[in-house]
Image (cartoon, helix red, strand yellow):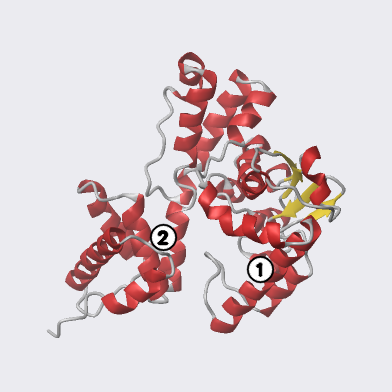
Amino acid sequence: MQEIEIVDEQGFRVFLAKRQLAEKTVKAHIRIVEEFEKYLEKRNSNNTIDKAKPIDFDDFSEILKKTGKDTIGNIQALARYAIFKNNKTLTVHVLEMTDGASVMENLSRNLRQKVGEDKWKEIFVGIELPPLLTLPKDKPKTTKKVMERLETKLDKKRRREALLSNLHFVPDEAFITYKKAFLESRNIDDFLQRRHAELVEKLEEHSKNKTLCFTQKVDHEVVEYVRATPTCEAGVRDRNTIYVTKIPYMTKKYLHESDERMKRYYACHCPWVREAIKSGMKISPEFCYCSAGFEKRIWDVIFGRPVEAEVLQTVLKGDLICKFAIHIPKERIEYAKGSQRKKT
């Protein structure tokens, strides 16, 4: 039997260099990829990650669970190698298994700090949070239970504060380049227009190179939808408010779907509720304040203080799109008018 090349280490290192990962992390990535490749070779001598199917990953993940190696770092490594090897089917599967995986755990942690031990117990005791590698179809039932308790045990203000509290735990450093670009822009409108133009350019590159934008395929139709929708991802300002809409999670299917329920399913990004839309399970649309919290993070960093955000439309309420309002702090509205800047 001809021995397969386990890992294209040199090429993978070049790929990872763009992410500026520490050498320790790179080596850990390579180790887990080698384990997966060896596992695939044992199953089928001709099987490698560029040919692997979701079932291969699912079976390997059972081994990771038993050995305590089912960590977010290891799963990220496998997802990145799948992207590097251009295995789109495997890439989508792994990313969908891990996308927002820590949200419910972070909600539990944040609530414990904000409302105290006794109130936290009323909400979370008896609810078993799904492990990292939980299938998307199994997540909504946890969301439903948590939201039912939140709406019973907390008033609207505290409930929304908890859901808005950066449940994706995105660090400020992730938005430093955006803040720099903002400070170099003429005003908020100029910054928003530049962000939208950069998104369109990025999608054009994905379309040209036939690469995935996160988990979705991009073609000319997808690019043109985003080009014609300036609120998409970046947002449009109207007086003191920035209105933002999400790019549909599966834009191509969304554009061609006539059934409203499936259209909402294709629009939804959230792995904690998306499958509930397809099955018909009812989950409180209040949960979408978690997404509003994600959308406002860039502005928290840009303005150097938490901003207010609200959900205007959501697929959980029957809307065909998710739309959020980001409220510009009064002391920062001079940026929108292009007046003399003050340092933030």
Of all residues, the one furthest to the bottom in this rendering is 2
* Residue 316 percent across, percent down from the top left: 68, 44
Q: Amino acid at mark 1?
A: Leu
Instruction: Assign the C terminus to one quadrant of the image.
Output: top right
Count the numbered circles shown.
2
Q: Residue furthest top?
A: 118
Point out the residue furthest to the left here: 1
Q: Which is more toward the observer, 60 or 328?
A: 328
Asked whether residue 228 is in view, the answer is yes
Q: Position of residue 102 (x, y in %)?
A: 45, 43
The image quarter containing residue 181 is bottom right
For the N terminus, give its image quadrant.
bottom left
Label 1 belongs to which residue?
A: 199
Disc with the residue nearer the chain's start (2 vs 1): 2
Q: Nearer the viewer, residue 181 or 261?
A: 181
Label at residue 94: 2
Specify the amino acid type for callout 2.
Val
| Res 199 → quadrant | bottom right
Left or right: 63 as drawn, with respect to 19: left
